[in-house]
């Protein structure tokens, strides 16, 4: 269900292999993913994860609300809940990366609900896979002001390559056509 919801919101990418590896116990690092419901109807998916090199930060993963439930306040409720979950992990900030073109609708939401946004550019990334500039949004999880990310390497390129392979796995496992 989580993989279907995530793919519905992000049809060019898939987190299926992440979900699957966590369920079967292969993935040992921090990853918390969940499905948001209204009564018994699944309306969205979201997760948080850690990049081990930056242990004071958790990252928002695959935050998406089904189209028919957007702009009704559910996204804000789900984000607020996730921020509280992240605070319980005793991290200094929550960040996410998004893309100008692929995630253009979400940009205004993040501008309203996060402390700051900054464009991301790192020479180590493979620029040819990006459509539009990546942007990182951040929010403080403590009493300290959130600091700019300042283009520290996060390997978005590898993530995007990995997501394409995950779409193939979803097809092989019969989750999507």
Image (tube, helix red, strand yellow):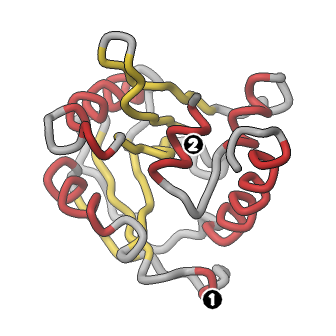
Residue 129: which quarter of the image? bottom right
Which label sits on residue 55? 2
* 169 is higher (above) or lower (below) than 44: below
The N terminus - image quarter: top right
Please indicate whether residue 159 sits to the left or right of residue 11 in the image: right
Which label sits on residue 27? none
Please indicate whether residue 98 sits to the left or right of residue 145 in the image: right
Task: Determine which residue is flagged by label 1.
Answer: 128
Give 163 or 172, whichever is nearer the viewer: 172
Where residue 36 appears, x then y in whole percent? 39, 24
Query: For the view shown, which residue lies furthest in the top direction?
Result: 39
Please indicate whether residue 58 sits to the left or right of residue 105 in the image: right
Figure label count: 2
Nearer the observer: mark 2 or 1; the answer is: 1
Q: Local crowd at mark 1 within 10 Å, few (<14), some, or many (≥20)?
A: few
* 171 is higher (above) or lower (below) than 174: below
Where residue 135 appears, x then y in whole percent? 38, 70
Tell whether label 1 touches label 2 (CB within 8 Å). no
Question: Element type at marker 2?
Answer: loop
Question: Element type at marker 1?
Answer: helix
**Residue occupying the point 42% across, 81% down:** 133
**Residue occupying the point 21% across, 36% down:** 76
* 100 is higher (above) or lower (below) than 74: below
Cα distance between the residues tagged 2 and 1:
29 Å
**Residue occupying the point 23% across, 43% down:** 70
Where residue 81 appears, x then y in whole percent? 30, 24
Residue 29: which quarter of the image? top right
Q: Local crowd at mark 2 within 10 Å, few (<14), some, or many (≥20)?
A: few
Between discs 2 and 1, the one toward the N terminus: 2
Where residue 160 appears, x then y in whole percent? 65, 66
Give 174 or 65, whichever is nearer the viewer: 174
């Amino acid at each position: 269900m989580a993989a279907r919801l995530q793919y519905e919101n992000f049809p060019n990418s898939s987190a299926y292999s992440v979900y699957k590896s966590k369920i079967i116990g292969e993935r040992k690092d921090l990853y918390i993913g969940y499905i948001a419901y209204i009564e018994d109807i699944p309306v969205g998916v979201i997760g948080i994860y850690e990049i081990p090199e930056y242990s004071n930060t958790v990252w928002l993963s695959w935050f998406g609300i089904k189209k028919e439930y957007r702009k009704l306040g559910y996204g804000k409720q789900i984000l607020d809940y996730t921020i509280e979950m992240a605070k319980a992990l005793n991290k200094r900030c929550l960040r996410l990366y998004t893309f100008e073109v692929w995630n253009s609708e979400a940009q205004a939401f993040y501008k309203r609900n996060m402390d700051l946004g900054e464009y991301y550019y790192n020479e180590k990334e493979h620029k040819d896979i990006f459509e539009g500039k990546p942007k990182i949004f951040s929010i403080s999880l403590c009493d300290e002001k959130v600091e700019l990310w300042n283009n520290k390497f996060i390997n978005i390129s590898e993530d995007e390559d990995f997501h394409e392979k995950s779409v193939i796995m979803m097809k092989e496992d019969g989750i999507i056509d």
